[in-house]
Every structure is written in structure tokens, then in C-alpha cells.
Image (tube, grey):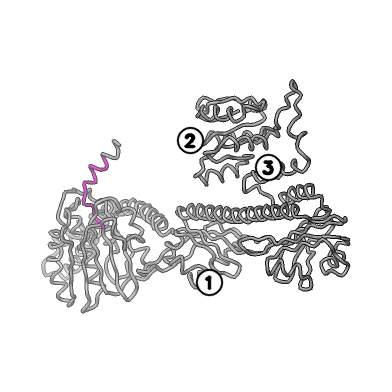
Amino acid sequence: MLLGNRPNSLRFIKEALSHQNIEILFKNLEDFDEPPTVFDNFDLVILDVSDLPPKLLTRIFDILHVLKNHPAATLALIPGKDTRLRYRFVESGVNDYLLTPFDKLDIQTRMRNLLKVSEPAYQETQVPSRSDRMPKALQHVSSFLDAVSMPLQDFEYDGFLHLLFDSIRSLLDVQYLLYFEVISGSEISLRYMIPDFPVKDDLAFPFDDIPAIVRSVRLKEVTILNQLNTENPLSTALKSFFNLDVKAYALYPVLLNNNVKALFLALRADNKKFHKLHSQWLAIAVNLIEFGLRLDSNRRQLDENLDAHVWQYSFEFLDHIINQLNFGIMVIDKNEKIKYLNETSADILQVDSSKSLYQPLQKILGSQNTKVILDARQPVEGTYERPEIEISAKDGSKILVGFSLTEIEDKTGNDGGIILSLKDITYSKELQEEMRRMDRLASLGVMASGIAHEIRNPLAGIKAIAQTFEEELAPEDPKNEFVKRIIKQVNRLDDMLKTLFSYAKPQKPNRQFHHIEEILREVLTLLKQKIQQQNIKLTQSYSSTLPPLFVDNSQVQQVLFNLILNSIEAIETGGEIHIAIESVGKEQQKLQRKPFYKTITGKPYVSIQISDNGCGIQREDLQQIFNPFFTTKNFGTGLGLSIVYQIVQENNGIIYFESEAKKGTLCYLFLPAFDTEEEAILEKKG
């Protein structure tokens, strides 16, 4: 059966095999939809892939997979330039292949090898077959030619020598043929001998005392002797090693790239001599041996190149796949050195992958993190959370890295190291914390609203009674002072309740487009006197073109007022506050490691960064600054930043703090420069 899409191939093959009794059926792959049992009726399936589109090529490999379970032989017709396709067919188990273009002799040889077909015997004329007419020696030569016509990767040098030596022995009627490999300039080793002689694989002997071999190896000379005496060194060696009594020998060097690689030795044990015709036949035989040696050398080189290409392709393919993963992969050997790391792990750890290879893990991650990782090989019972380490980024920020590890064993079953997978969980941790914070603030808001209502009613009653006392008391009555104090404290509590109501039920923002420069100018006007009193240096930097913000003007003023006021209060005297405003774009790689980076990327935001060199915030306090009633000051209610957080959330903004005690604080405030209400409507429709 011929499977393909070119009927011309069928005509060519039929013409090539016209003298043989072979029936060939062509099936077009585009219409081929037969059950697997159809192949049971065929001895050979020819797969013509010389000009196939990719979709049909995929079907060919599916069919080849099915043919593995059928006795039919397979032959592929492959484009000569497509080396990778050739390798794929070999790996898929095809019995043989032909590279296009090929001639009729090529297809005849392949078919004969696969089907074991011989020339037909024409019984009607009683002409004897070719094999009957060929001398036995020529039958060997025919088999020999079949051996060298096979694909290079299937060439077997030992089988080649066996066929060739059988042919030579029959042609020359010699008793022994030996083939020695030259190990060095003074030693040879027997590789092949006919008739078979039981020898050890390591049968080697020096030849410095055998002049004929010395001349062959070092001078590339041929030696033929027809009369040997018992004292001849080569005769003595053959008697010693193989117990052979020889009367004559012919010794030829076998060359490869003009170097003597082997010796070919023909021996006579009878009284016949080597004549000129014999020497001519032996010279031809040596040429064929050298041809086979070149084929063997080429096959070895092909195998090495193929192995190298396959390994390189496999490694590059796997490396490409591993580098596409969104988590890091590291391989650590038993000596705690890095044997491999993909690009993602190098990016997470912010290291150069080429310079990190074969470096101690401790040098890359530090001793503490290395200890945490190695200790994780023996997890504490009852621990289900993914272990994590903390590393410092180049900009000084902290990165949380979650990891898991798998121990690997070498071929002997011993500890071979660990495979470490890494994931940057900074953003997810911040997101989890943000969700917890929002839930906590929502719960506190509901509770604060209820408490405020419960306090406000009796507080109003207390104030009414105090005001009644104030009206009834005479102006000169000393009790008036106490009444005034009661009313003052009630008013103070009432102001606090108003702030609490503002936190519990914030006013819905009235968002419009406003310019941030104008909003900030009004805020700084209110704080100008306080800044001057504390001798604070205020610096500002603005991008040349800033889009308008879609926010509530008064609410953003309140946010900026509170944030700048906090910076003022954090500075004792003579400090500095810097305000930087710029548009946010994807090109701002400096924000890539920040937990808010994914949120602000792809949409127009304006970044407002307020930094100071004040007292800073302790690391353990940084996670609580948005909690209501939390404050590190000796005054205040602790509601300021809670209200700021809610206002920013209501205006679809983002606020984030970085701080270090005694060094200062940096506040990131991102406000939208797009109509968030319109976008929300579009998202619902979309």
C-alpha cells in the first residue's frame, strides 16, 4: 500500500518494480479513513511524505503509531533536505526510508530488503534463476552489496566484515583471514577472524619484534611471503597465539585519512601460493575494507552528532519551556551549590543567572534564608502553610518569596540534592492583607456607627441639662465654671462622634475632573504657616504634562491635608518634605516590584509621592496604621489615616506606605485620571 497525495509516486514505483510480481495499491491520505485492520492485508506500507501539508503529516504519524501493532513493514519517502523530519521518522519506528529524489535502483533495493523479494523464475522457459547461475563467491558479493546499500545509521561494521571476508575467502580459496586494529605504534589487537576462533576481547600483543607488521604500521608497506620457515617472526606469533601452521601470508595496512588504523592478513595453510591475481583481489578487498571503515567512522560521527543534536534540542526545548513558567525553578546539589536556575527564579532573586551557577546557595540567599530552606526538608508536623523567605530588592524593598522543594536522588539512590520552586508572593500577601483590612474596617465601621448612636443621645441630654443649669445660675455664681467645663467636654465628645460618623458612613464622593496642581496649591496654603514655624524645607517636582484627576475635589484636599500634616508632625525641626507628582505608565520599571503595580498598569493613573525624613514608623506598626483608633502620637484619635484610607478607596485610588524607623516615610498615592464610573458601566455591558 502507498499512502500519500501524489499519484505520480505510484506510477514511478510501479515502473521500477515492473519485473517483479508485486501488487501496489495507492490510497490518498485526504480521503483515507480506514480501520486499522486494513493493514493486515499488506506486507509493506509506503508513506509518501515528500510533499505533504502539516495537517496530513500529523495523520501520517498517527498511522505509523497504528502500524506498530501490525506485521507490515514500513518505508518512508522523505524530502532530502528535511533532517529533523528524518530523525522523527527514525524515532517513530519506521523500518526504512528513502530521501527524495531517488532513482529506480534505490526503490528496488529497499523493496528487496524489506520484502525479501528475489528475481522471478520464469518456469515457462525453464531458464535457471540468477542465483542458480552465480558462483557461490558472487552470491557473497551480492549480499555484501546489499549490506553497504542500507541507510548509514543501520550500517554494522562487524556484519560488513563478515560478508566481505566470506566473499574473499571463497574467491581466493584461502584458509584464514584476520583483521587487527592498531592500538598504538607498538601494539595491535585482534578484532575479527574467519573461520571463527575463540579469542578474548582484550587479545592484544606487541609487534616491535615482527618486521612485517612494523613495516605495515609505520611505513604503510604491503608484505606477501609464499615460503615461510618456522623461524619467521610472524609465523611464530601466529603459532603462539592461534596455534596456526601457515605456509604463506599476505599482509596489508588498512588506512583511514592516510593513517594506518588496521591490518588485514590472509593466510594459507596449504602449499599453494599467492599469485599476482590474488594480490589484485586482495588490494581490492583492502579498498573495500577501508570503504567500510570510512562508513563506520561516518556512522559513529553521525550517531554522535545526532545524539548531540537530540540532546541539545531536548535541553533547549525543556529550557525554553521551563523559562516560560511563571514561577522559579532552581536545582541545588548535595553540596548546596546551584546547578540550574531558570530566568524567572533569577528575576525573583534579582541575580544574574550566568554568574549564579555553581555558586553556594548561601552566597545568593544569605545564611538565614538558606537555613530556612534546608530545614524545610523536614517539615514540622501539623504545618500546612507554604514556607517563605524574605529577600531584599535592589531598591531596598522587601520581597516575600514562597517556596516548595522536592528531594532528588542520584542513580545510586543517594541524596542528589533538591529541586526548589520559588514564587514571588509579595503582591498576593499584600492583597490578602488588603482584603483583611477592608473586612476589619467594614466591621469596625458598623460597630462604630452603633456606638456613636448610643453615645450621642445621652450626650445630647447631658449637654441640655448643663445648658439649663447655666441659664438658672447667677452670673457671679462660682458653679458656672463647672457647668462651662461640662459643656466644653460634651462639645469635644460631639466633635469626636462627628469624626466617627464620618468614618463609619463616609460621604459619597462627587467626582469630577480636577487638576492636581490646583488641589495641592490650596492644601499647601492652609499648611504654609505650620511648615514655616517648624523650619521645614518643602520641595516639589511635577511632570510637564499631567492629566486631570477624576476625583472629589474636597475629599482629595482632606486626604492630602492629613498626609502632609502627618509628615510635618513626624519632623522635629529643620527636616524636609518632598512631593513628586507624575503620570504612571508601563515604562515605570521602578514600581514593578510594588504590590500595587498590577493594578495601576494599563490604566491612566497619577502618582503622588510624599516623602519625609521624620521619625518614621516601626515595621510592626506599619500594618496597623489604617486601623481606627491606632496612633503612635501622644494626641489625636487615631481616625485620621482610617478616614484617608476610606476616602481613597471611594475615589478608586490606591494608597501605600513604606517607612523605616528614624529614617523617614514614603507615601504612594495613586488617583485615577479616567472616568471610573463610565468604565464600570462599560464593564457591566461588556
Identify the residue under disc 1: 360
381 left or right of 460 in image: right
Q: In what element is the residue under mark 2?
A: loop
Q: Residue at x 75, y 40 (%)?
A: 139
Question: Is the residue marked by circle 2 packed among few (<14), some (14-19), or many (20+) residues within 10 Å?
Answer: some
Question: Is the residue marked by circle 1 packed among few (<14), some (14-19), or many (20+) residues within 10 Å?
Answer: some
Q: Residue at x 52, y 46 (%)?
A: 84
CA–CA distance in space, label 3 to label 1: 58 Å
Q: Nearer the viewer, residue 55 or 230?
A: 230
In the depicted structure, whether residue 253 falls above or below residue 21:
below
Looking at the picture, how far across and down is residue 149, in whole percent? 64, 44
Q: Nearer the viewer, residue 669 or 545?
A: 545
Q: Nearer the viewer, residue 388 or 231?
A: 231
> As shown in the figure, which amino acid type bears the numbered disc 1?
Pro
Looking at the picture, how far across and down is residue 234, in whole percent? 81, 67
Whether residue 14 appears in this view of the structure is: yes
Q: Residue at x 45, y 53 (%)?
A: 324
> As shown in the figure, which amino acid type bears the numbered disc 3?
Asp
Q: Nearer the viewer, residue 390 or 480?
A: 390
CA–CA distance in space, label 2 to label 1: 53 Å
Q: Earlier in the sequence, mark 3 or mark 1?
A: 3
Image quadrant in which the N terminus is located: top right
Magenta span:
670-681
Identify the residue under disc 2: 51
In the depicted structure, whether residue 614 falls above or below residue 14:
below
CA–CA distance in space, label 2 to label 3: 29 Å
248 left or right of 423 in image: right
